[in-house]
Amino acid sequence: MKYIVFILFTVLTNAAAQVMLKQGMLSLGPLSFTADTFIARIFQVVFNPWVFAGLATFVISMVSHLYVLSKVELSFAYPFLSLAYVAVAIFAYFVFHEDLNAWRIAGIGFICVGTILIAQSGMSSHEDQSSLEAAGAKTAKIGSAS
């Protein structure tokens, strides 16, 4: 559980990026693409300050996620990313006044319960696995020496 802070940082930066991207797209308004304006629209979207900040925050989130993946099992770390939906739904409710109805709240509840179950399943880090393998090798040598 010592990497949970990094996992939660990944989740929160992922959610923050979504909120920034939404703000950026709201500030741009409805987009229309034609053959003549396609490239200009892409630059308009990517270089919108909110969209750019959201994309940069995604990069930070991905770097954090890669660090986490170097330390813990994928099957432990990846399900925590579903908590980003929880954070986004709450932020969207307060920031953008989006609907947070009973179905969404129930879904959020299921996501939270599932994440808690996964967290309770425990995790093993690559460092822990290496030390266990080393201890197992020492035990095997001790056992074979007798």
Image: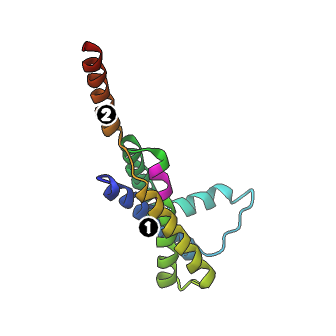
In this view of the protein, can residue 18 be seen by the observer? Answer: no
Whether residue 21 is in magenta: the answer is no
In the picture as drawn, the residue positioned furthest to the top comes out as: 145
Looking at the picture, tell me which residue is in the foreground, 118 or 8: 118
Q: Which mark is residue 132?
A: 2
Q: Is residue 42 above or below residue 137?
A: below
In the picture as drawn, the residue positioned furthest to the right comes out as: 35
Q: How would you classify the magenta stretch by its main secondary structure? A: helix
Give the residue at x 48% y 59%.
Answer: 81
Q: Is residue 122 above or below residue 18?
A: above
Q: Which residue is label 1 attached to?
A: 16
Badge 1 vs badge 2, beta-carbon distance below 8 Å: no
Question: Is residue 129 rendered to the left or right of residue 73?
Answer: left
Q: Position of residue 143 (x, y in %)?
A: 28, 20
Dot 2: few (<14), some (14–19), or many (≥20) neighbours within 10 Å?
Answer: few
In this view of the protein, can residue 62 be seen by the observer? Answer: yes
The residue type indicated by label 2 comes to Leu
Give the quadrant of the C terminus.
top left
Q: Could you tell me which secondary element the residue under label 1 belongs to?
A: helix
The residue type indicated by label 1 comes to Ala
Numbered range of the magenta stretch: 76-80
Looking at the picture, tell me which residue is in the foreground, 125 or 15: 125
